[in-house]
Amino acid sequence: MTEEKATFVAGWNFDNSYARLPELFFTRQAPTPVKSPKLIILNDSLATSLGLDIQAIQSTDGVAALAGNRIPEGALPLAQAYAGHQFGHFTMLGDGRALLIGEQITPQVERVDIQLKGSGRTPYSRRGDGRAALGPMLREYIISEAMHALGIATTRSLAVVTTGESIIRETELPGAVLTRVAASHLRVGTFQYAAKWGTEEDLRALADYTLQRHYPEASADGNRYLALLQEVIKRQAVLIAQWQLVGFIHGVMNTDNMTLSGETIDYGPCAFMDVYDPATVFSSIDIHGRYAYGNQPQIAAWNLARFAETLLPLLHADEAQAIELAEDAISDFTELYHRNWLAGMRAKLGIFNEDPQDEPLIKGLLSLMYKHRADYTNTFLALTFDKKEDTALFGSTEFAQWHELWQARLGRQQEGTDASHQLMRSSNPAVIPRNHRVEEALEAAVKQGDYSVMERFLDVVSRPYEYSPEQAEYSRQPEPTACPYRTYCGT
């Protein structure tokens, strides 16, 4: 079969609009071939939605493309340049072990990035080897797909391919390549890079491209660049509220890990909170708790302020007026976030309308959860099915009083008990990708070559609102341990 025919059958339909930006923003770079690619997991439903032929993708030629050994027709591989504040410190960055292969135009005429992660060195690799280990790639696959199932905007995982090669980290590990699908890989850090090392025209070209790609309706606004800032702020306010509502902790909210599309990206030291505690940190490198669960809204605002700074030359010719416009826009984030979070919390408690006492009611519950070290997800799950005896709060006078206030609040709305119950069912997942279950799946896959544990786990977390009997065992907390759970930057 010729390359052209194999590519056509596979369904790749690439365009390369990012490559039409000024060359400042990227370096053309071919993936580094791997020794012996083998397909480990393929996201069939995602592949179909992208217009790909599942059988062709699983063929020798198809797997070669997923590994970077073969460039599909129409692809134009490149490494993107960007910068970022990492734990508050500004630095030059870029795709150090990832390549944008091209932009797939789907049957629905949507444009999405296809990126290979772990595809070899680039000019931005610094001292890295450009490769990725199997465990972290499978971890991103699991968590990103679980986030998608929870209804949270996220990059997605199309496939993981092992390379037949080992990479050296703390130990020798099997290498892998992840195929990531994203609305785009435009980041706050991309704009920081343009503002620092580009011209004003470079910055304008990037802003116009972002508007065209993600916010075309805002392009007609009187001040289109202010509209861009406002739209990004709105999407991030929604996203961060969704994180908080499910107890998700990103772990490394650097500005290069904040997308302009509003998708969650870069699942490195991320994890889901078990016991409710705003100070929860999982990342081994976040020793001061900068990116703790309770700090995520403030960090998002800080990151957005950095984005606004990059746009100042475009917002207004007069710097003072540009700063005023930016500050006014950023000041809206906290209220937008709070509004989204409060609406989500109301839904988690079966509340349809608004009441001034809702926030004290919600915070009262969270305070009790913190005091009694209650599991965040399971507490809301127990309330959903009126099984208060299943919570760590049961038996305390304070909780009995809170429960009485909650029932009285539900009684003050027109919607009945059944409607409230249904609202809670659709707002409180029965299962999340709990950390010990993620580690269990990864250990079986990486150390034993057993992918069945991961496959069962993926099946369960892909239906978080189903409340099926098989989900019960996956909803249990881990056994107590003297060592706190830690994650590492490995993706």
Image (cartoon, helix red, strand yellow):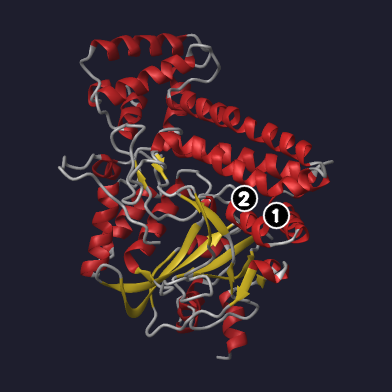
- Residue type at mark 2: give it: Leu
**Circle 2 residues within 10 Å: few <14, some 14–19, many ≥20:** many
> Does 204 appear above or below 350?
below
The answer to whether 55 appears left or right of 377 in the picture is right
Tag on residue 294? none
Q: Is residue 19 visible?
A: no
- Quarter of the rendering occupied by the N terminus: bottom right
Q: CA distance from mark 1 to mark 2?
A: 8 Å
Per the image, the residue denoted by label 2 is: 260
The answer to whether 48 appears left or right of 478 in the picture is right
Q: Residue at x 49, y 57 (%)?
A: 156
Q: Is residue 38 visible?
A: yes
**Circle 1 residues within 10 Å: few <14, some 14–19, many ≥20:** many
Q: Which is more N-terminal, label 2 or label 1?
A: 1
> Does 435 appear above or below 234?
below
- Identify the image quadrant of residue 368: top left
Tag on residue 210? 1
Q: Name the spot of residue 191 as percent of width and height, x first.
A: 64, 55
The answer to whether 23 appears left or right of 334 in the picture is right
Q: Residue at x 78, y 36 (%)?
A: 321
Q: Residue at x 44, y 73 (%)?
A: 130
Which one is in front, 341 or 476?
Answer: 341
> Does 85 appear above or below 78?
above
Q: Name the spot of residue 441 as percent of width and height, x first.
A: 27, 58
Q: Name the spot of residue 301 as percent of width and height, x first.
A: 56, 38
Element type where label 2 sits in the image: loop
Q: Name the spot of residue 195 as percent of width and height, x first.
A: 67, 55
Element type where label 1 sits in the image: helix
Q: Are marks 1 and 2 in contact (CB under 8 Å)?
A: yes
